[in-house]
Image (spheres, rainbow, N blue to C red):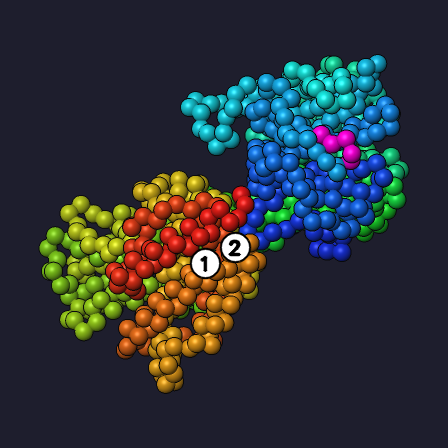
Amino acid sequence: MLLLPAVFACGAGDSSLRWVDWAKQTHRQVVVDREPGQYLGHPTTVLLSDERSILAVYPKGHGAGAITMKRSDDGGLTWSERMPTPASWETSMETPTVFPVDLADGRRRLIMFSGLYPVRMARSEDEGETWTELEPIGHFGGIVAMSSVERLRSVDGELIALFHDDGRFLRRRTSRYERIPGFEPDFKVYKTISLDDGLTWSEPEVIATHPEAHLCEPGLIRSPDGREIAVLLRENSRQFNSFVIFSRDEGRTWSRPVELPSSLTGDRHVGRYTPDGRLFVSFRDQAPSSPWRGDWVGWLGRYEDLRRGRREPSAGEVRVRLMDNTYAADTAYPGLELLPDGTFVATTYGHFTAGEEPWVASVRFTTAELDQAAASAPAEAPARPVLRVGTSGDYPPFSTVAANDGGDSPADSEARSGFSIEVAGRLATDLGYDVEFRSFDWPNLTAAVRSGDFDIGMSGVTWRPERAAVGWMSRAVAAGGPCVVTDADSPNTPRRIAVNRGGILERWTRQRHQGTATEVIAVDDNLSLPGRLERAEVDAFVTDSFEVEHFGRDGWRRRCEPPLDRKVFWISPKRAEDLGPAVDRWIQRNEGWLEARREEWFGSRQERDELDHLLDLTARRLSFMPPIAAWKKERGLAIEDLERERVVLEAAERTAVEFGLDPAPVRDWFALQIDLAKAVQRRSAGVQSTLSLEEIRPALNRLGERQVRALRVLATRAREPETSAFELLGPYLDSGEVDRVRAGVTRVLADLTGVTGD
């Protein structure tokens, strides 16, 4: 049965769920670890015997990556530097999890697991001062192993540990990125038992499966009287609510999985009881109708609420957003500790800064503070923020608008389609927005962006320097070039040529035919261009390599320029600082999905990677040089400005240090660009000034920082650049200069590779 829209509102059963938003309460937030350009994620924590000290472990990377450990000796108020760890911890392949094991002699043992095949474990007998190497616990593997460990109330005092697998790792060493032909996920939740306080573990046994749902990431919670065990389960197909199973015989048998209330639907549940006996659960929100979907949230209620299921979607007392995750649902593998004074210390990772890699944070609070906030909080879910997306509706295959006769409202009366429309929907969802489309016309596009008529333009916008000085222009999502379309009888030099008014193509057409006998006819209806040629009103029209397939007719000829025009998303100045980096990060993370969308909508592949992005940024810097040269010439200023060069190089070095890079090769890379920029300026005689230096320099500063970010990524995954990658520099540099760039890229990547971690 598919998940119906959740109803988060007062009046569902006897529920009066309150919505508390603490995302902006920075006084509660503590930075555990943060490193520019480095992904830090998936922490778990353990409270030590003194009930004040906390250890946190987490990978440098998304799940896989070297295990990092930090310690707090003051209840999570401050955190140590990264602690030394055994060599084998560098080889961790999955999210590390750490748990305490209280021994009969009063000592406390710590055990830490790292999953995939085989599951491995390290232990500490001195509360985290020293640790063993990671060693296999058996001939089996699993994902997020172990997500729960609990002492059983039995004669032998066993430990039970829970994990899941999707059919890939239980019995074989498989790369998480390997594509297995014909593979169908087969999610199962497993238990394994230890009879010697966590030193050895039994063969795993299945405790939960479902014919349709994908059950995973078990979070174990005992009933208040200790007689029952509940296990909350993530549902990974996203077709159901989260699930719960129960055991009243210490895990020997289990109930069938049933869905949880929507208010508890999410991933990686971790629960602790409050001093007054209620239950607080921390998790990643995945309820479809929640305005906080994809954010780090908590839930306050009672153990009995776990049984209410879908019939009471708003079960519980409080739903609280702990921090705002700005990218997709990449957050909230939480640690949750309760201090003796009643303070909760909740710890997780997330994209808490838009456009940045995720970092690890703690949020501190008491139940009394949460109750006080809930007393004045609304009982209705807050509205999701809206992302206003500008589209032209006249530019296939990016965006088209067709009448929809079945619409009951103005918004329903238009059916939008195209690459940009599909991407806008995915982007908005991943960044936590509802989407609202707004129309623009090309002649007024710059003015609309400048005035904030919409947050982001996504309709096949071409990058140009005069545009880039306004707001933020994203990473390239496609590349194309102008095309001239004629019929078989058209003259070689057209007398009349039509082009859409106000865009880049009109400028290109007028420049190409300046001083000729050709009449350029600018039209307001881009979609009318083919009909004008069919009716012989013009001898040719100009389009580009994207829409030429939509405008072509049998027998028509086309002549296309090389695909050097980069298509981008244009973010308004009001949203540039927060939304711009977030959109860039989203494009980088979703490049595989975008490539599939390009192939579907454009009919061909246009593979983009970080090297392509670095060279694109280099070309963007060079494209600013002609207007800079014109501005200097008008004022009688010299091309060379040694003081400005010093400022640029020092800024590059500072940014390199912030991102953990050796500043020397980064400085050399920027020095090469400065040298080439001066060469382009010297060749730019006769160019008219279109921008002031005051407008250009902020854009250049952003390009510089974005280049360092690209170098930070390339430093860990560098490849030898291919000659074709440098074609986009052709409009600005001669062949010898392009060779200098190629050598410079090879040199800087060679110098940086191996300097940084995963």
Q: Residues within 10 Å of mark 1 (few under 14, many from 20)?
A: some
For the stretch drawn in magenta, what is the main secondary structure?
A: loop
Which residue is denoted by mark 2 in the rendering? 661
- Over which residues does the magenta segment extend? 123-127
Residue at the image position 60 percent from the left and 33 percent from the top: 88
Q: Residue furthest bottom?
A: 636
Q: CA distance from mark 1 to mark 2?
A: 9 Å
Q: Residues within 10 Å of mark 2 (few under 14, many from 20)?
A: many
Q: Nearer the viewer, residue 506 or 282?
A: 282
Residue at the image position 86 percent from the left and 43 percent from the top: 342
At label 2, the amino acid type is: Leu
User: Is the C-beta separation of discs 1 and 2 under 8 Å?
Assistant: yes
The answer to whether residue 315 is visible is no
Numbered disc 1: secondary structure = helix
Q: Nearer the viewer, residue 183 or 373?
A: 183
Residue at the image position 84 percent from the left and 29 percent from the top: 107
Percent across and percent down for residue 106 are: 87, 28
At label 1, the amino acid type is: Pro
Which residue is denoted by mark 1 in the rendering? 665
Q: Nearer the viewer, residue 192 or 715?
A: 715
Q: Judge from the rendering whether residue 346 lies leftward or rightward of residue 4; answer left or right.
A: right
